Amino acid sequence: MTYKFDFTAVLAQWPLFLQGAGLTLKLSVAATLVGLVIGTLCAIGRGSHNPIMTRACAVYVEAIRNTPLLVQIFLVYFGLASVGLKVPAFVAAVLAMVINIGAYTAEIMRAGIESIHKSQIEAAECLALSRPQIYLHVILRPAMERVYPALTSQFVLLMLATSITSQISAEELTAIANRVQSDTFRSFETYVVVAMFYLFLSLLMRGAFWAAGLVLFPRRRKLGTPL
Amino acid sequence: MSFGFNSNHLMFLLQGAGWTLVLSLMAFVGGGLVGFLVALCRVSPNRTLRYFSIAYVQLIQGTPLLILMFLTYFGLSILGLTLPAIVAAGLSMTVYVSAYIGEIWRGCIQAVPRTQWEAAECLALSRVQRMRLVVLPQALRIATPPTVGFMVQIVKNTSLASVVGFVELARAGQVVNNSIFEPLIVYMLTAGLYFLLCFPLSWWSRQLEHRLLVTQRIEVSAI
């Protein structure tokens, strides 16, 4: 092996990398927040008494969970363009990620909601809580508390999956890497640096979720159950 | 100026689906073998092995598969090897799958009740015997549903092999779309084919999980 590793040319591009990492993080946060809302609504819809609603939610979840994100991104970006709706790559990326993570969140939240005992809801009804109050305080919050670890690791996976949006030229970290490597011809070094960036971002997200868990679920801290 | 979608395009997509299956199988077999080693290292009494496997899993699970693909592809060419795209794709899928499936199986091994380990120890079985005769057969039953579920992830993630130039289903879809420019039809069809590959696996995984739950419930009530 006569190859000489040279990171200087790659590391000289650090402002670009930082900018890409920022966009990756922005994409992830946007998709996480909107996806959480959609997923929760879908999980509630799946447990409703309306058969059409239940079916529609089930079809959405199964369709998304059984097709690759790459194809979903292509469908959103090129599909929308072909019906005359030309959206910027970043918007299409966020949209595809939201649709994707919504389905995964729905499955996780459904597991959480199903774990809430019926007697809890009956007790809440006896206390004359309204339907939204029951959902908010008795069902959703404890449900989320229970599935919090699964939920957060799904969101970290989502952050890693945003790399796929580089395929429609959303200018996030991987797209920046592709650009830098074609400028510097240092492909291996570039991807090593970017891999380190992703590693750091995933550690950062895990730390942030852990800290958020301490604030969001104080009861858990009191009971001493680890997050 | 559309030339329309014809049977040739469909055949090309089906061929791509065939390659997706081949790559998935490679990834599952290779990843399963390495993943099994990772799982064993994770529960090993040897501290060095344990830390090493934890670091490996953290490293791979903290990096996107897309980056792994690029690293393998360009890394192999630095080593002076010009290998076909399927080898690069198969190798990176193996590494990726091993880290995830290793963690799944580690959980399954640890889910075997502690008393089983202790009983095996009381019967003076060696560590290898204990693993082979007592723990692993029981872990296998717990591991089947999540493993089948993870196969869905494998099939879906092979779509990323398109970035290193391997013509599997997603790449075939791109090629067809570039020639006729009917993104809605082509990608819908591609997604449909993926669905046909993945949905039976998801369904099977759910069935297995259900059966496992039922048998566990019966065992618990028998005690």
Image (cartoon, coloured by chain):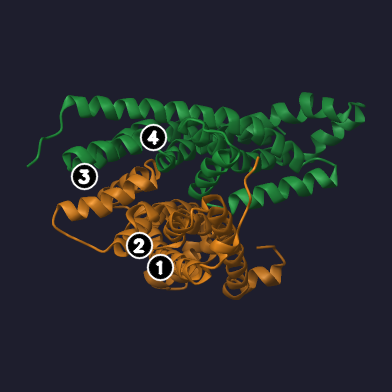
Q: Position of residue B8 (x, y in %)?
A: 20, 25
Q: The disc numbered 1 marks a residue on which chain?
A: A
**Tag 4 and tag 2 share a subunit:** no
Q: Which mark is residue A63?
A: none
Query: The residue under label 2 is which amino acid type?
Result: Val
Kindly state the secondary structure of the residue where label 3 is placed.
helix
Label 1 neighbour load within 10 Å: few <14, some 14-19, many 20+: some
Q: Which mark is residue B199?
A: 4
Who's green, chain-wise? B
Give the alpha-carbon distance from disc 1 to disc 3, as whole Å. Answer: 26 Å
Query: The residue under label 1 is which amino acid type?
Result: Ala
Q: Is residue B132 visible?
A: yes
- In this view, the mark in front (1 or 4): 1
Give the alpha-carbon distance from disc 4 to disc 3, as whole Å. Answer: 23 Å
**Residue B14 higher or lower than A127, as above or below:** above
Give the alpha-carbon distance from disc 3 to disc 2, as whole Å. Answer: 19 Å
Of residues A45 and A70, the one nearer the viewer is A70
Of residues B37 and A212, the one nearer the viewer is B37
Query: The residue under label 4 is which amino acid type?
Result: Phe
